[in-house]
């Protein structure tokens, strides 16, 4: 192997016998366009710092900018507003999602150019969506007496693939202290123990990547759960 010891510089993982830098921007992604995401090696954790600039809240009837880490929309005058959606979960490992919201009284709701909710006097609406694996994008609008609203676009990710955790180095005998890096292959919460115990949802945890400074005999065991709720198939240990 190119790297028989399994020891890599800080910020890298051993994969296939070679050291390779991990993508901390992707691993620390909080799915917020108004933050800059990265791993802070000094604090030994992911950080998400507010940024400015334009953003998109999915509502075509607002002009949006980032303020204090949040996407804030200002209404566009004369714009026919689309339906309002209640919060929904994404990513998810459930292939069936209930989408709810409000709409103008008497209007229908169209999703991807198909009528999903017929005209009615109700001001609330609800539909059941069957998801395909991966990203599912929906363009939603209301139609009131033949007049279509502007659209709101959402994406729901159906993820049934469990995360995987890599530990570098993956074990061994060292004559001096060693830095061990643990990182997942996607954003995830990693539960761990350092005494050989079984990690579970009540164990200590970190987000996606962490460095451990080891000076004594230690049995490190980890198991990750991704943002969709999928658990890593087996405990990873070193």
Image (cartoon, rainbow, N blue to C red):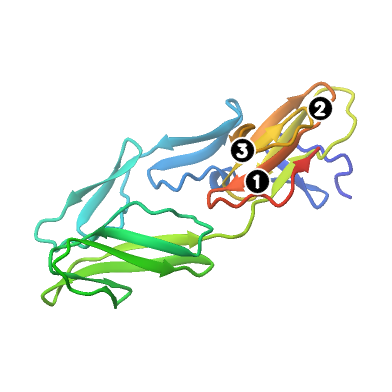
Residue underneath mark 1: 184
Q: Nearer the viewer, residue 122 or 44?
A: 122
Give left or right: position of 191 versus 37.
Answer: right
User: Which of the 4 image quadrants contains residue 129?
Assistant: bottom left
Label 2 vs label 3: CA separation? 21 Å
Would you call the spot at circle 3 few (<14 residues within 10 Å), some (14-19), or many (20 or more)?
few
User: Which of the 4 image quadrants contains residue 173?
Assistant: top right
Give left or right: position of 40 versus 4.
Answer: left
Number of numbered discs: 3
Q: Nearer the viewer, residue 126 or 150?
A: 126
Which image quadrant: the C terminus? Answer: top right
| Residues at marks 2 and 1 touching, judged by CB atoms closer than 8 Å | no
Q: Position of residue 109 (x, y in %)?
A: 24, 70
Instruction: State the SS at label 3.
Output: loop
Q: Mark 1 or mark 3: name the one nearer the start of the chain.
A: 1
User: Which of the 4 image quadrants contains residue 236?
Assistant: top right
Q: Position of residue 1 (x, y in %)?
A: 89, 50
Q: Mark 2 or mark 1: name the one nearer the start of the chain.
A: 1
Q: Nearer the viewer, mark 2 or mark 1?
A: 2
Residue underneath mark 3: 201
Write the residue at 34% across / 51% down: 87
Instruction: State the SS at label 2.
Output: loop
Give left or right: position of 9 versus 44.
Answer: right
Instruction: State the SS at label 1.
Output: strand
Label 1 vs label 3: CA separation? 16 Å
Residue underneath mark 2: 218
Q: Position of residue 127 (x, y in %)?
A: 33, 67
Residue 43 vs 160, above or below: the answer is above
Label 2 vs label 1: CA separation? 20 Å
Write the residue at 73% across / 25% down: 213
Q: Mark 2 or mark 3: name the one nearer the start of the chain.
A: 3
Would you call the spot at circle 1 few (<14 residues within 10 Å), some (14-19), or many (20 or more)?
many
């Amino acid at each position: 192997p190119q790297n028989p010891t399994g020891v890599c510089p800080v910020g890298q993982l051993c994969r296939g016998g070679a050291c390779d830098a991990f993508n901390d921007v992707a691993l620390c992604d909080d799915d917020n366009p108004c933050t800059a995401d990265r791993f802070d090696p000094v604090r030994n954790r992911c950080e998400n710092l507010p940024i400015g600039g334009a953003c998109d809240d999915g509502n075509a009837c607002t002009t949006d900018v980032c303020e204090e880490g949040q996407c804030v929309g200002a209404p566009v005058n004369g714009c026919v507003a689309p339906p309002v959606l209640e919060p929904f979960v994404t990513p998810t490992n459930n292939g069936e999602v209930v989408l709810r919201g409000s709409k103008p009284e008497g209007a229908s709701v169209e999703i991807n150019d198909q009528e999903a909710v017929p005209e009615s006097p109700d001001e609330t609406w609800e539909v059941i969506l069957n998801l395909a694996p991966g990203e599912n994008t929906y363009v939603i609008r209301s139609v009131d007496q033949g007049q279509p609203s502007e659209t709101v676009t959402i994406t729901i990710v159906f993820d049934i693939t469990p995360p995987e955790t890599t530990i570098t180095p993956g074990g061994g005998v060292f004559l001096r202290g060693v830095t061990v890096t643990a990182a997942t292959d996607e954003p995830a919460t990693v539960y761990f123990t350092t005494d050989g115990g079984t990690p579970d949802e009540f164990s200590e945890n970190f987000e996606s990547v962490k460095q451990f400074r080891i000076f004594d005999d230690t049995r490190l065991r980890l198991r990750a759960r991704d943002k969709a709720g999928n658990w890593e198939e087996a405990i990873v240990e070193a």
